[in-house]
Image (cartoon, rainbow, N blue to C red):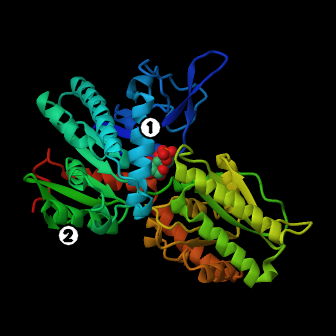
Amino acid sequence: MVQSTSPMVVVANRLPFVLKKNEATGLFERKQSAGGLVTAVAPVVVETGGLWVGWSGLHLEGKEVVIPEADPSDKSPTAGLKSEQVIPVNIESQLFDDYYNGQCNATFWPLFHSMPDRAVFNEDKWKAYRKVNEEFARLTVVAVKKLTERNPEQVPLVWLQDYHLLLAANSIRAACDEQGLRVKIAFFLHIPFPSWDIMRLFPWDDELLQGILGCDSIGFHIEDYCLNFIDCCQRRLGCRVDREQMLVEHNSFTVGVHPLPISIPYERFCQMAMAAPQVVKNNEKMQIILGVDRLDYTKGLTHRIKAFEHLLEKYPEHKENVTFLQIAVPSRTDVKEYQELKENLDQMIGRINGRFSTPNWSPIRYIYGCISHDQLAAFYRDSSVALVTPLRDGMNLVAKEYVACQTGDPGVLVLSPFAGAGNSMLEALQVNPFETNDFSDTIHRALTMPKDEKELRMRQLQRRERERDVEFWLQSFLKSVDCLKDDPAKKGTM
Ligand code: G6P
């Protein structure tokens, strides 16, 4: 367990659990949400007596959300989080829609993934985003005040998460200054940070960059994203920067920029894979190719299916011997682009299955929905090949989960270089998802790879991921915030 010296206030768009109404009692109950961030960070919030500020997933239109205590049977990482440690953000639905579906997911998501043609620029959505960030900031200051009253000696650490909260830092700092509250503010972006060429398309890019620079410490997954950010600060705001030390000077403060590649609870996945019952039928000859993604256009699902179709054309020996299993988790279903992608996928899969299926075999199995963690671990473990081939992705944790679950005969990871994970998982077979012919050759190579080579590649991937797990990420983050403004002795200067 990582120790933190400061009590932590995590501020994220979502709370670390979902609230579900129990129809029988009419009361809300917590439902686990399983992301890596929650697994890693919730225990630190619990340990430091910190707080979590986030949207409850409900729209109660002015009514207060009462956070229930965890069920006594709850074994999840958030079980230790008391209701008083949770501050729900309640936003009325129209405003929330403009902020979340509009600004966050119809503008920032495509823009930050370097897909500007899909991005919508709309001043009303930007105004809604500002307003919602202010509300998050207001409640964060309530949290800081609570912690300071409890222990005036300790400086709370506010940790803002992701592209939903790019503007919150300055409002938090201004309000804390006004109320005489000391605070450290850190930020972590879970998606890529694009190059200056892309960022400059956003009409309010200066305001956005200044918003991020309101933090003391800024984390991105990989060095490329850090350098993109530093570049934008220099070119758009004229900041003095140091690329070697990754520092940006702004308003006479020096802000540290840190590459912090996020990871997974490796041992937990490993254990799950060892314990999970078989889900794939025992058929020696049939090889499973697996894809697991949120249904999102950044994940390159249509490119992947096209490559699989080409594989069947070019290497007919795989017919009846290979099944492609794609699990697509529904996501952002109110956004038009996501609805269109879903229709597109349904059609493509239907057409390919119609074209190649035989009485005993269908080439593609498609699950549109969620599956349990145990089932997922078993699918990972029992698949010969995993295709993690996004067009662009901040990190991609599926690649890491697949590796952790190779507890039996190892499979082969096929990975796009356009995922942050491609930076370090060098023993995977790399493939450009846009090159259909090469993509299908790479799947063929993965399916026919000698056992020795598979083992060599997988053992090396496992060694690295076991060591650099999510605890390592959290520890690196906590080290990086040691050099904050509140600690001038340790603070980096230019
Ligand atoms: C990405 C983002 C997260 C987000 C998740 C699911 O991983 O970086 O911040 O929570 O997608 O998306 P959703 O819109 O459902 O929260």
Across and down, in percent, residue 197 comes to 29, 68
Across and down, in percent, residue 269 comes to 59, 54
Across and down, in percent, residue 61 comes to 44, 22
Instruction: Say which of marks 1 and 2 sits in front.
Output: 1
Across and down, in percent, residue 202 comes to 30, 57
Q: Kindly identify which numbered label has been placed on residue 243.
A: 2
State left or right for residue 354 relative to residue 26: right
Task: Give me the residue at 35% from left, 43% from top.
Answer: 125
Task: Give me the residue at 36% from left, 49% from top.
Answer: 163
SS assignment at label 2: loop
Q: Could you say which quadrant of the image residue 395 lies in?
A: bottom left
Task: Give me the residue at 68% from left, 47% from top.
Answer: 371
Instruction: Name the amino acid type tagged 1.
Output: Asp
Task: Give me the residue at 27% from left, 26% from top.
Answer: 142
Would residue 274 be visible to someone looking at this image?
A: no
How many C-alpha atoms fall within 10 Å of the one at disc 2: few (<14), some, or many (≥20)? Answer: few
Q: Out of 180 and 295, give the one closest to the viewer.
A: 295
Q: Could you say which quadrant of the image residue 51 lies in?
A: top left
Q: Residue furthest top?
A: 25
- Mark positioned earlier in the residue sequence (1 or 2): 1
- Residue carrying label 1: 97
Instruction: Name the amino acid type tagged 2.
Output: Arg
How far apart in space, not on screen, are marks 1 and 2 (Cα)? Answer: 38 Å
